[in-house]
Image (cartoon, rainbow, N blue to C red):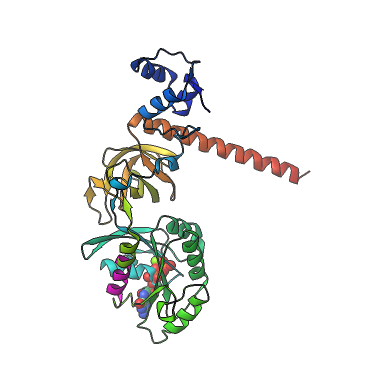
Amino acid sequence: TESLTVGELAKKLHREPSEIIKKLFMLGVMATINQELDKDSIELIAGEYGVDVEEEVLVDVTDLEAYFTEDEETNLEERPSVVTIMGHVDHGKTTLLDSIRHTKVTAGEAGGITQHIGAYQVEDKGKKITFLDTPGHAAFTTMRARGAKITDITILVVAADDGVMPQTIEAINHAKAAEVPIIVAVNKMDKEAANPDRVMQELTEHGLVPEAWGGDTIFVPISAIKGDGIDELLEMILLVGEVEEYKANPNRNAVGTVIEAQLDKGRGSVATLLVQNGTLKVGDPIVVGNTFGRVRAMVNDLGRRVKTAGPSTPVEITGLNDVPQAGDRFAVLEDEKSARQVGEARAQLALQAQRSEKSRVSLDNLFEHM
Ligand code: GTP
Ligand code: MG
């Protein structure tokens, strides 16, 4: 569209036409609701709301992906690597993270099975690394796919006494699809039955050839339980981070992804977010998935209250009107009004999609029974 009427533009920006007319008036343009606006005026008004007008199409402000814009090179700064730990059930992913964090997360898990993505940050040699734990249980495929999508590096944990298993292969495929580097941690080396050569052999068959065999995959033998090999593993992560040079712009409105979210009796909607670009601050107006709000309080992975969260930081927030879904995108908007408008528009669109899906299904059912 090379031109839009004032009314159409207002709709695209999720604003009242009267507001657009007022804005135009302030800019010295007298307009009515049905008046055609040229490209320059559209750009000018959209710019007032922080919306970019691409070549021909007006960016849809309800599309949260549209807020993941590229930054000027000069605004980019180094950020911590985001590392996702993946692998077959019980191969020792959570134990590895415990060992890295010198804590005891597994002790608190129901049946020692991870049923969500845990997110933590550690510091090694003055550099921060963000870790995401994922479940290895077969039922949690979407969680693993999501984990692979928001990560920079995948740590593939393979138990040396068990070898390559179905979810090991699944994890490789997620990482390959997401085009992220894989570091293999051959775990449980302390066990009598540990057979690292077999693990290397089996992984070679899946395209992960160890450096020792002329390939380019880093293999680190570890014992998560004893803490052996952990320093080497962290070193390899920092090395990959140095080569890849992960960067972000801390001086912009935050955008990122929901790691997990739930309803808490006392605190209401609680969401763990991974800030992928920008800095999230207490008080920020925010759209998260199909809901919105204002960041009321933020807690880091150590349970401490924080006021800001920069790029690659996982943080738990309260202040949303509703519970978003894991994997949802979030974006901080200019003001609370915009956040409300975009959030409500998204909720509306989601409802419509759900309704049409339902009616489509029932129509299909109808034909099935004819
Ligand atoms: P899911 O989250 O359910 O996929 O499992 P996980 O991969 O997180 O495994 P977890 O860390 O819960 O460990 C599973 C079992 O393996 C536990 O009993 C651990 O104590 C044990 N284990 C983990 N690492 C090691 C290790 O290096 N050596 C030995 N001997 N046992 C280990
Ligand atoms: Mg686990």
Q: Is residue 103 visible?
A: no
Boundaries of the magenta span = 229-238
| Residue 231 is a magenta residue | yes
Say which of 307 and 241 sits in front. 241
- 132 is higher (above) or lower (below) than 251: below
Q: Main secondary structure of the magenta part?
A: helix
Q: Is residue 176 visible?
A: yes
Q: Quadrant of residue 361?
A: top right
For image coordinates 40% across by 81% down, the residue present is: 212
> Which quadrant would the C terminus be assigned to in this image?
top right
- Quarter of the render that holds ligand 2: bottom left
Say which of 22 and 324 sits in front. 22
- 310 is higher (above) or lower (below) than 226: above
List x then y, in percent, for residue 300.
27, 52
- 15 is higher (above) or lower (below) than 70: above
| Residue 273 is a magenta residue | no
